[in-house]
Amino acid sequence: MEQPTQLSMKQNACFKFLLLAGLILGLPVCRADAGPEDKYPPQVLSFSADKERQVQDLARNLGISVPAEIGQFFKSATRGDYSVVSNTIARLAPEYATSYQKKPENLPAWIPFWQPMCEVEGAYTAFAAGGPKYPLAFGNGIARSIPKGSIYFGGTDAGRSLVSALCESHVEAKPFYTLTQNALSDRRYLDYLQSMYGTQINLPTTNEVQKAIDEYKADALLRLKHDREFPNAPRQLKQGENVRLVAGEVQLDNAVSVMAIHARLVKVILDRNPKPDFYMEESHPLDLLYAHLSPHGLIFKLNHEPVRALTAAVLDADNAFWTKECHPILGSWMKPDISISNLCEFAKSVYGQKNWSLFTGDRAYVTNEFATKAFSKLRVSIAGLYQWRLMNQSSADDPTRLKVEAHYAFRQAFALCPSSPEVVYRYVGFLMSQNEILDAIQLVDTARSLAPDNRQFEVLLSQLRNQRR
């Protein structure tokens, strides 16, 4: 049976983040109407059967039996019974959370099978929430863009589980390897990856995981000391990077810190596997990797060497791709130079009032919670890359063109889901960096009208108005 890692036993930061990520990435971020239920596509049923065989192989290799409850979980999954799948995960999740504090001999017998169970549940949840059309468009759009033999990091639940389910074989890496960056410091997850891919690709060792943690903590401590010693200077700790020093020990219990560690581990995998191409869907901005990223359809290509500049050809291709993606679902009105006022009027009319009189897009999209959340997340991630390159400008980049493309990508992300907190906050950050506070206020006011229960928007709007005064 698996042994919890030193990190998990000592501070449990990684698992705390996994719970946080599950909440953040699993919550609806755009108000939409529930769609009709449809039968689950055959790929999900066959994926469940493949994962059942994987669990049986894991059990044989570990010399243990598959608990009856887990066996029933997979039997139900292969029959398309989502209620059993979701209820089982919901019932076991709290016990899994506390299992990191238990001794190895006291761990539940199903712990080694948790990862394949979550992958099955994640694929089912995407179709349960979004129906067949847009989950298939999302998963196939990513999977078909990735060359054979590549290594892919899925960030969101759908980006990991849905893409895995729509591949020929996740276990056999056909046509590519699928990992998630969100759990790379968790020994249990690394053991799971080793059982699938350990003989084919180089994965981080326990020592490398600990080294990444130690290096991050040392760097964070220096920045914490700087902020304490120079309170009037620009802060070096990032927003949300809640680093604390307790009894001489650096304590990490926030998503920003844990994902910074995971970025280091992604870099380890990138460096130790020089031949395959790498691709990534973003879950949380990873500053360490931004220099290596370039747009690739719905996701990013993760280049082995830093990208000197995003060329005109790369920017043209990204612009054309997303224009083609957005026109059928939003309508052809979406242009790079559309004003914030017109963008907000569209959002209020279509998303807020459900006024279809002038809408030429796809109603099934704007009323689909899964779709609005998933595709806006993909687009705002690419907008964030453009913003990062503007702030960390290379002499080879064209700042004027980057600014144009950043504006367009942020506008598209907002139109794809105007009440997404991530889209709103990241777009406001960009607008403020360009001294466009009136546009920022209008944007937040629109998001607040679409999500009146979201207290964050009310607070942000008040802050912006005060800053304007």
Image (tube, grey):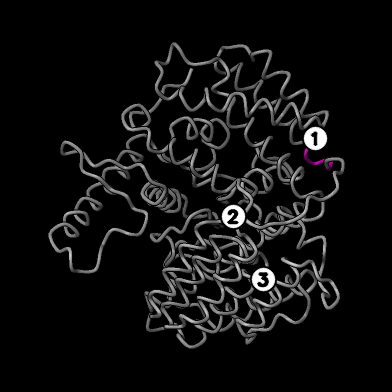
Residue drawn 64% across and 48% down?
Answer: 176
Where in the figure is residue 387, as x and y percent of width and height? 46, 73
Whole-percent x, y for residue 468 in the image? 40, 80
Q: Which label's residue is closer to the chain start, 1 or 2?
A: 1
Q: Is residue 175 above or below residue 315?
A: above
Residue that carries the numbered disc 3 in the rendered image: 415
SS at mark 1 in the image:
helix
Residue at horizontal 82%, vertical 32%?
Answer: 80
Q: Earlier in the sequence, mark 1 or mark 3?
A: 1
Q: Earlier in the sequence, mark 3 or mark 2?
A: 3
Query: Left or right: 357 with respect to 235?
Result: right
Q: Quadrant of residue 343?
A: bottom right
Is-magenta flag for residue 445? no
Query: Dot 3, how many residues are within 10 Å of its Cα: few (below 14), some (14-19), or many (20+)?
Result: many
The residue lying toward the viewer, choosing from 449 and 308, is 449
Q: Residues within 10 Å of mark 1 (few under 14, many from 20)?
A: many
Q: Which residues are magenta?
A: 41-45
Which residue is labeled 2 in the image?
Answer: 453
Amino acid type, residue under disc 3 in the picture: Ala
- Numbered disc in front, either 3 or 2: 2
Q: Secondary structure at mark 3?
A: helix
Does residue 177 appear anywhere in the picture? no
The residue beneath circle 1 is 45
The relative height of residue 165 versus residue 35 in the rendered view (above or below) is above
